[in-house]
Image (tube, rainbow, N blue to C red):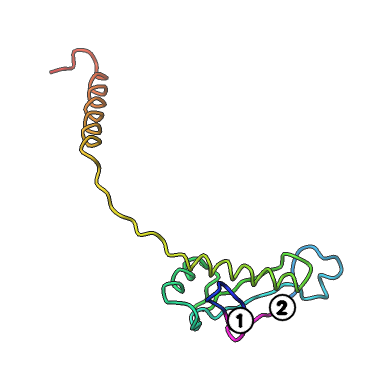
C-alpha cells in the first residue's frame, strides 16, 4: 500500500516492479546485479483516482504514459535496488500529488478605456515618426 495523501492510497495490485541491470557507475557489480527499477502503475484502472486527476496525470506523465493507460517510471539513480525502489515510489507519489491540484480557471478580462486610449495614442505617435523618415520633398 502506497499512501499519497491522508485519503488517497494505491493498492499493491495497481503497482508492479521489475528489475534490470543499470547503466552507469557500479564497477564490476554493474554487470551482475539488477539494481535499476521499472515501476508500472495501472493508472487508468485505478479506482482511487478521479477521472479529472487521471487526465491531469496523463498530461504530466507525457511519454511515460502507455497506450494501455499505465504509468511507467524507470529509476537507476543509485547502486542500491532498495533505494531505487523508494525513489520510484516517491516520484510516483509526487506526480499524483501534482495531478491532484486542479489548475485555476482563467477569467477573461477587458482592457480598460484608459489603456485603449494610450495604445492608440502610441500608435499615432509611432506613425508620425515613420512618416518623417521619407525623403525631403516627397510630400506630393
Residue that lies at the very extreme toward the left in this rendered image:
140
Seen from the viewer's position, the closer of residues 105 and 64 is 105
Q: Secondary structure at mark 2?
A: strand
Residue 106: within the magenta?
no
Which callout, 2 or 1, points to the residue nearer the camera? 1
In this rendering, is residue 114 above or below 23? above
Q: Which residue is mark 1?
A: 15
Looking at the figure, which quarter contains the N terminus?
Answer: bottom right
Check if residue 17 falls in the magenta segment. yes
The image quadrant of residue 20 is bottom right
Image location of residue 125, percent across then percent down: 24, 25
Residue drawn at (39%, 59%) of the image: 104
Q: Which residues are magenta?
A: 10-18
- Which of the labelled discs sits on residue 32, or is there none? none
Identify the image quadrant of the C terminus.
top left
Mark 2 Cα within 10 Å, few/some/many (few <14, many 20+)?
Answer: some
Residue 109: horizontal and vertical position, in percent? 27, 49
Q: CA separation, marks 2 and 1?
A: 13 Å
**Residue positioned 61% across, 81% down in the render:** 15
Q: Residue at 55%, 70% (x, y): give it.
A: 64
Q: Position of residue 126 (x, y in %)?
A: 26, 26
**Residue at which label 2 appears:** 19
Amino acid at each position: 500500500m502506497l499512501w499519497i495523501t491522508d485519503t488517497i492510497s494505491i493498492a499493491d495490485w495497481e503497482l508492479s516492479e521489475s528489475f534490470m541491470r543499470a547503466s552507469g557507475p557500479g564497477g564490476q557489480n554493474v554487470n551482475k546485479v539488477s539494481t535499476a527499477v521499472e515501476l508500472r502503475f495501472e493508472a487508468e484502472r485505478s479506482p482511487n483516482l478521479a477521472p479529472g486527476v487521471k487526465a491531469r496525470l496523463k498530461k504530466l506523465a507525457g511519454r511515460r504514459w502507455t497506450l494501455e493507460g499505465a504509468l511507467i517510471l524507470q529509476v537507476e539513480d543509485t547502486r542500491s535496488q532498495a533505494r531505487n525502489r523508494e525513489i520510484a515510489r516517491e516520484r510516483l507519489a509526487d506526480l499524483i500529488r501534482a495531478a491532484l491540484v486542479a489548475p485555476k480557471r482563467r477569467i477573461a478580462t477587458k482592457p480598460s478605456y484608459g489603456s485603449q486610449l494610450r495604445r492608440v495614442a502610441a500608435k499615432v505617435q509611432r506613425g508620425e515618426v515613420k512618416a518623417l523618415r521619407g525623403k525631403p520633398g516627397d510630400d506630393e
